[in-house]
Image (cartoon, rainbow, N blue to C red):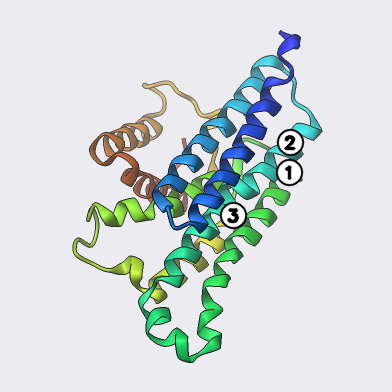
Amino acid sequence: MKFLWFLPNTFTFLNLFFGCVAVVLGLNGDLEALAVFVLLGLVCDFLDGFFARMLNVKSRLGVQLDSLSDIVSFGLTSSIVIFVLLKKSNYIIDNGESNLYLQLIPYSSFLITIASSYRLAKFNLSSTDSFFIGLPTPANALFIVFLPFLFKNNIIFPGSDLLNNTFFLLFVLLLSSYLLICNLKMFSFKNINFSIKDNVSFNLFIITALCLIIAYSFAAFPLIIAIYIFVNLLGIKF
């Protein structure tokens, strides 16, 4: 199987390519298409690790390439989504023309990219992969990038206009950035005991996630990540 050594890095580069496309789509205002390409990048991110382990071709170069790709596909794309939403938010629209400083507020969204790069660098220096320290960048991207789907479907706060609320978006921005760099231990799926009998908590989480996806499609992702964060805050062991 060594002749397939190129597969992991191929999927890493595909992840980066999809991330670049997503950034362009986001800057053109198409956040739904951006979300689809982020999801494609996420699939490639999973496959590069899967094939690296299966073929036993892990390398230091592959680890660095994976993180560099993730900064674009999950860090920068998340910032672009918040940037676009902030530029269209009520407080900026109503007061931005008369105040230069307010026009700069959307650029604070790139704090997520900075936090993502710090989080990925810290992960590369970590000596364990049995758990995560801080929210993984793909999970953070799923939460941020699919927020428009969640509010578009009126699943929570029906009839609310939160995605146009500048202060709500800034709260999401700051919370997201903090979760990326915090020291909260979060479970990794790599070392989960998949036994139905021995790991009831994990199976309840998976069943809940699947039910949400069936019921709400793409809009389910922010809810699933919120549950993931809440479960880790409670310290529930899987």
Contact, mark 2 vs mark 1 (Cβ under 8 Å)? yes
Image spot of residue 93 (x, y percent): 39, 80
Which residue is located at x 69 percent, y 56 percent? Answer: 118
Question: What residue is shown with label 2?
Answer: 63
Q: Nearer the viewer, mark 3 or mark 2?
A: 3
Amino acid type, mark 2: Val
Q: How many marks?
A: 3
Residue 173 vertical position relative to residue 235 in the rendered view, above or below: below
Q: What is the spatial separation of the Cα atoms under label 3 and label 2, in whole angstroms?
A: 19 Å
Marks 2/1: CA–CA distance:
7 Å
**Residue at the extreme left of the image, as rendered:** 159
Indicate which disc, 3 or 2, sits on the residue closer to the N terminus: 2
Q: Answer yes or no: is residue 136 visible.
A: no
In this view, the residue in front, 210 or 99, is: 99
Say whether disc 2 or disc 1 marks the residue closer to the N-terminus. 2
Within 10 Å of disc 3 (Cα), the crowding (few <14, some 14-19, many 20+) is many
- Residue 217 shown left or right of residue 42 in the figure: left
